[in-house]
Image (tube, rainbow, N blue to C red):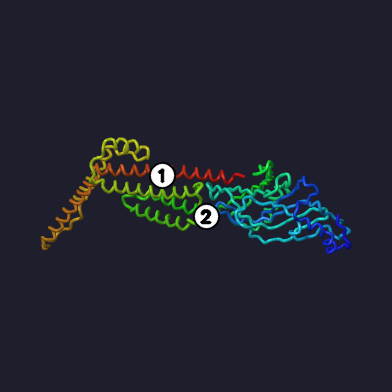
Amino acid sequence: MANCSRPNQPALLEALDPVFNLSAIRPVMNITTCTHVSTFFTLYGILGVDEKAQRLVTYIWLEFWWKNEFIVWDPVQCGTGKISLPRNKFWVPDIVINEFIEKNAAPYVPYLYLYSTGVMHDSQPVKVVSSCNLNIYTFPFDIQNCTLTFNSYIHSAKDIKILLGRSVARMTENSKKIMTTMGEWELLDITAHNFSIAAQYEDSSIDQLSFHIRVRRRPTLYVLNLLIPSCFLITVDLFSFLLPPQNVDRSSFKMTLILGYTVFLLIMNDMLPITGNTIPLINVFLSLCLALMVASLLETIFITNLLCFSACASPVPHWIKVFVLQILGCLVFLPQKTKEQRDADIQLSTVTAQCEVVEGPPEEKVPVVEDKTVVELRTLGRDLQAIRLQVEQQLKGSQTSEEWMQVGFIIDRLLFGLYILFISVSFITIIIIWVTSYNKT
């Protein structure tokens, strides 16, 4: 019992002077008495998450409460119920955070509070750079669960027992209320549990208190800068199948699209996580988009080659006629023309050409005085026009060329349908995984 000569702080400090000489020992009257240390913290800010180094950087306000059995005084006699004193004058519990991997860069607080009942209150800011097993498979819709484990570095559970000084619900509420960082991460909740582990060199255990901090990434930045542009480009590549391959250089268009997407990925490469544990789903998504564009280009090259060399190609094999022209043609709604339809088309083209040749341009009565050379030139022009029409009719009527072109159109439409099916299934699967993970609370 400290007796103060006057009700002021100098007198109280003088009365506490004998206690300062006991700062080297644990403040209990009986050595077998256990010191209960109440612990809690307030999460002030989430400064960053380093996926490559697998660490979480947070800023917390850490508080410890314990009882010093050597001290007690009358607050009326001494004029105050509490006083702040240098921490080096008292015994302080050696409680550490196991996941700490860097030195605390927060400002040092040299004082703590001492109450008239002997209760001591130590409060200090801590910049915690802690190791954390980060799972970024569902990046950027990921939720990370990092642990901060408090325990005494030397004392066993018989000497120091760590207790939860405040409910986790209140800790979570206060942390969300005062957090100043409104960046990439948001706090979901804080949970805690107390347990003991066996000591390394003694037949005793060490008391531990673990806090689990769950944080969720805000995905807006990555959706706007990575996912939406990729979806736009893959949509453009999808609709490029509607360009007629026999009239438009579709391959040049697709090649330009692939080049633009490659440059886009190089620019946005710094936004993607780097880790060796798992491959993030967004990397699979971006690689899938690029692979689909390359496959689309290869398909265009094949179809263009088939259409260009159809005129000089050999007759279509029978199995291709049956499988492609008849079966696949009906499947993609491009049925093969019957022989009667082809004959009717050829006959119509022939009759039209003959009518154009016979009719020709209207002849004017040639005056007798007109030179005979002009008449011969007109006749020669009509003959050349007839020859040209006959050649065009022969080219259009080539059955082999027409069948190969029909094969190309059927394969092009079939691959277009498979392309749509594969994109739909892949994207729906990835979206389901992302939504399921993001809604997990």
Decide if residue 349 is on the left or right side of residue 285.
left
Secondary structure under tag 2 reads helix
Give the percent coordinates (x, y) of residue 132.
59, 49
Residue at the spot 72% in from the left edge and 54% down from the top edge: 63
Dividing the picture into quarters, in which one does residue 120 lie? Answer: bottom right
Asked if residue 163 shows in the view, the reply is no
Crowdedness of circle 1 by 10 Å Cα count: few (<14), some, many (20+)? Answer: some
Q: Nearer the viewer, residue 295 or 216?
A: 216
Q: Quadrant of the C terminus?
A: top right
Residue at the spot 39% in from the left edge and 50% down from the top edge: 240
Give the percent coordinates (x, y) of residue 251.
34, 52
323 is higher (above) or lower (below) than 211: above
Separation of marks 1 and 2 at Cα, in angstroms = 25 Å
Dividing the picture into quarters, in which one does residue 348 lie? Answer: top left
Q: Nearer the viewer, residue 234 or 163?
A: 163
Give the percent coordinates (x, y) of residue 127.
64, 57
Asked whether disc 1 touches disc 2, contact meaning CB atoms under 8 Å apart, the reply is: no
Residue 430 numbered mark, or none: none
Q: Amino acid at mark 2?
A: Leu
Question: Where does label 1 land, which residue?
Answer: 419
Secondary structure under tag 1 reads helix
Q: Amino acid at mark 1?
A: Tyr
Decide if residue 93 is on the left or right side of residue 375.
right
Residue 224 numbered mark, or none: 2
Give the percent coordinates (x, y) of residue 214.
62, 48
